[in-house]
Image: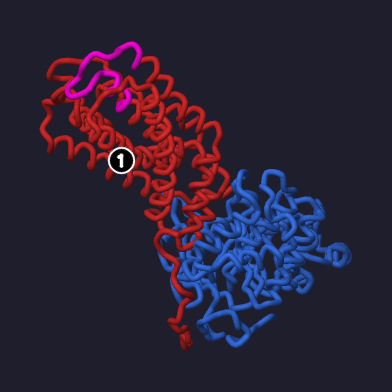
Chain colours: A blue, B red
């Protein structure tokens, strides 16, 4: 876990104690008409954490991020960023966002983009020049973005987000549509920010991305948190296979459950059937067959992330 | 948990930011398509209508001068409203979301765009009036040259806001398809194109619609007497300006579109 002390932020004129959460959601819900997009989230993100919001489309990730940056208001509950409102953190330049693909104006130059952000946050031109150099675009500063490559555009957006030295960086599906090289470069930059002590919160639907780049994964489905913990721990929940089988009656199904309980991450009962999520499917099968449980209709499938989400959500709901 | 946050913020950057406005002005004046369309068309209209109406007297001047004043309004508001076209692209490209995540307030954004539009409108008016002076066919009192210029220029404020509103709320289609017809219809009904619409109903419409106030203000500077009372013209002119600014500000504030 990366933590930092207030003294690490030499560039900051203020001090926020380390025990103040970077982002705190207090029983936050968001309704769109009858639809509940976000259902009573209660999350505290410590300063310096790199957090992945993992979930399938429609899980409420974007709605959650929109409330964190203050562009949408919770229907219920409230959001705190660095001990204040999202808006106050945005105004200070402590909370910024790197958008997925847009955010640039084709007839403006690289420098103009960064310079106008610096201006709006009350920084002089010098600050814009520094950041443009920092992201390696000093020699392309006077180019219009319409002639920039995808990687260069990404760096322009990064420079815009960094100009106010943010402490919390929000990224919504940041790498969608990026080619491999650009994606690699992108995460290298994000990591440099994390090293500096910046809190990073990114939404993704790739388990792999969450796994590789975060300290903590918050898994969401249907507007709720279905798992939250260190990345390795959450990964175990969704990795592996799903073994399903059927039994003659409920009693023998229950007997089988007690037999393989230590191997299963999660067991779901459907009448006289079982669905067992596990990373050790070979052993599960072996025990079920060897112990003569009367199990039939075996099926073993890779545990896709969508499946994992669904089973976790149902586990929560029941 | 003890909150240790101290209230010693980075110096606040509120209100109008100089670089932001400068950049908007630069972008306005380098938009070649807008310049050609918005600057050249009023001049062409002036040459055409001005010649058609010729030197017939009108108030303390002639009809040619009245056409010049009217085309001044037309060029000014069309140039100002042209911000709609670039704003739609900026918004759909996610630029507005970027701006919303800065200390920039909706009213400051609108004000910045209006200042840029005023610069564009000013240039369009200067060009048109220079043509008018060079041709020596327009006759009106010196004060009216300045007054009609100023009135036309003032119109840019409201129509820049109107253009912004259209650009900010339209997701599909070209904003020009709304901005141009609305401006033209208001122009016709307010008497901008010298089409005589006489009768009580037309008078009432003229007093109510956007541009009605501006056109009549301009006409009163030297032209034929206008029956409408001054307070109606004040309410019309200032009222629409304020309404359009409120609409544009609202449209920016509600917009969180991400791409």
Q: Does residue B22 appear in the picture of this structure?
A: yes
Q: Does residue A39 appear in the picture of this structure?
A: no
Give the letter of the chain under mark 1.
Answer: B
Compared across the picture, whether B107 is left or right of A296 comes to: left
Q: In terms of depth relative to the viewer, which is nearer, B86 or A253?
A: B86
Residue A129: x, y in percent? Answer: 65, 65
> For the residue labelled by badge 1, is the local secondary structure a helix, a strand or a loop?
helix
Q: Which residue is mark 1?
A: B154
Q: Please check the rendered image and state whether residue A94 is part of the magenta-colored stretch, yes or no.
A: no
Q: In terms of depth relative to the viewer, which is nearer, B36 or B183?
A: B36
Q: Which residues are magenta?
A: B50-70
- Quadrant for residue B181, please give it: top left
Instruction: Please report the residue visible at 51 percent of the width from the left and 76 percent of the height from the top.
Output: A82
Q: Please check the rendered image and state whether residue B51 is part of the magenta-colored stretch, yes or no.
A: yes
Compared across the picture, whether B58 is left or right of A32 comes to: left
Q: In terms of depth relative to the viewer, which is nearer, B203 or B22?
A: B22
The answer to whether residue B128 is above or below residue A87 is above
Residue extending farthest to the top is B52
Instruction: Please report the residue visible at 55 percent of the width from the left and 58 percent of the height from the top.
Output: A116
């Amino acid at each position: 876990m990366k933590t930092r002390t207030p003294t690490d932020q030499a560039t900051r004129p203020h001090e926020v104690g380390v025990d103040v959460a970077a982002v705190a959601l207090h029983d936050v819900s968001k309704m769109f008409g009858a639809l509940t997009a976000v259902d009573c989230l209660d999350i505290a993100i410590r300063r310096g954490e790199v957090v992945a919001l993992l979930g399938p489309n429609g899980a409420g990730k974007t709605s959650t991020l929109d409330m964190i940056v203050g562009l949408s208001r919770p229907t219920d509950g409230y959001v705190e960023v660095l001990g204040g409102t999202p808006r106050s953190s945005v105004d200070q330049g402590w909370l910024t966002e790197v958008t997925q693909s847009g955010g640039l104006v084709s007839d403006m130059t690289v420098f103009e983009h960064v310079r106008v952000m610096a201006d709006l946050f009350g920084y002089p031109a010098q600050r814009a020049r520094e950041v443009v150099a920092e992201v390696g675009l000093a020699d392309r500063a006077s180019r219009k973005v319409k002639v920039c490559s995808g990687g260069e555009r990404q760096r322009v957006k990064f420079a815009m987000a960094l100009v106010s030295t943010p402490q919390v960086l929000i990224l919504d599906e940041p790498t969608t549509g990026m080619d491999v090289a650009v994606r690699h470069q992108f995460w290298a930059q994000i990591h440099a920010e994390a090293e500096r002590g910046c809190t990073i919160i990114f939404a993704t639907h790739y388990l792999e991305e969450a796994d590789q780049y975060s300290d903590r994964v918050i898994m969401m489905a249907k507007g709720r948190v279905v798992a939250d913990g260190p990345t390795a721990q959450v990964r175990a929940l969704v990795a592996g296979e799903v073994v399903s089988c059927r039994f003659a009656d409920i009693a023998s199904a229950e007997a089988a459950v007690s037999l393989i309980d230590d191997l299963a991450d999660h067991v779901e009962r459907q009448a006289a059937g079982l669905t067992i999520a596990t990373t050790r499917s070979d052993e599960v099968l072996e025990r079920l067959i060897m112990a003569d449980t009367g199990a039939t209709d075996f099926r073993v499938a890779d545990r896709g992330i969508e499946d994992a989400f669904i089973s976790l959500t149902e586990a929560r709901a029941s | 948990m003890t909150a240790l946050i101290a209230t010693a913020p980075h110096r606040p950057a509120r209100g109008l930011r100089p670089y932001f406005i400068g950049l908007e002005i630069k972008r306005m004046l380098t938009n070649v398509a807008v310049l050609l369309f918005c600057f050249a068309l009023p001049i062409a209209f002036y040459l055409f209508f001005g010649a058609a109406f010729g030197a017939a007297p009108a108030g303390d001047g002639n009809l040619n001068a009245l056409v010049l004043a009217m085309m001044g309004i037309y060029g000014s508001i069309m140039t100002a409203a042209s911000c709609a076209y670039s704003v739609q692209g900026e918004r759909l490209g996610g630029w507005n979301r970027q701006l919303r995540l800065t200390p920039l307030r909706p009213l400051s954004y609108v004000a910045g765009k209006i200042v840029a539009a005023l610069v564009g409108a000013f240039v369009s008016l200067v060009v048109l009036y220079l043509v008018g002076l060079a041709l020596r066919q327009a006759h009106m009192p010196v004060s009216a040259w300045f007054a009609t210029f100023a009135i036309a220029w003032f119109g840019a404020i409201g129509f820049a806001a109107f253009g912004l509103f259209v650009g900010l709320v339209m997701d599909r289609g070209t904003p020009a398809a709304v901005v141009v017809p609305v401006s033209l219809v208001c122009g016709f009904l307010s008497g901008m194109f010298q089409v005589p619409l006489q009768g009580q109903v037309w008078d009432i419409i003229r007093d109510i619609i956007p541009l009605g106030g501006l056109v009549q203000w301009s006409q009163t500077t030297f032209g034929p007497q206008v029956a409408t009372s001054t307070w109606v013209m004040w309410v019309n002119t200032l009222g629409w300006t304020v309404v359009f600014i409120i609409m544009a500000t609202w449209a920016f504030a509600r917009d969180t579109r991400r791409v």
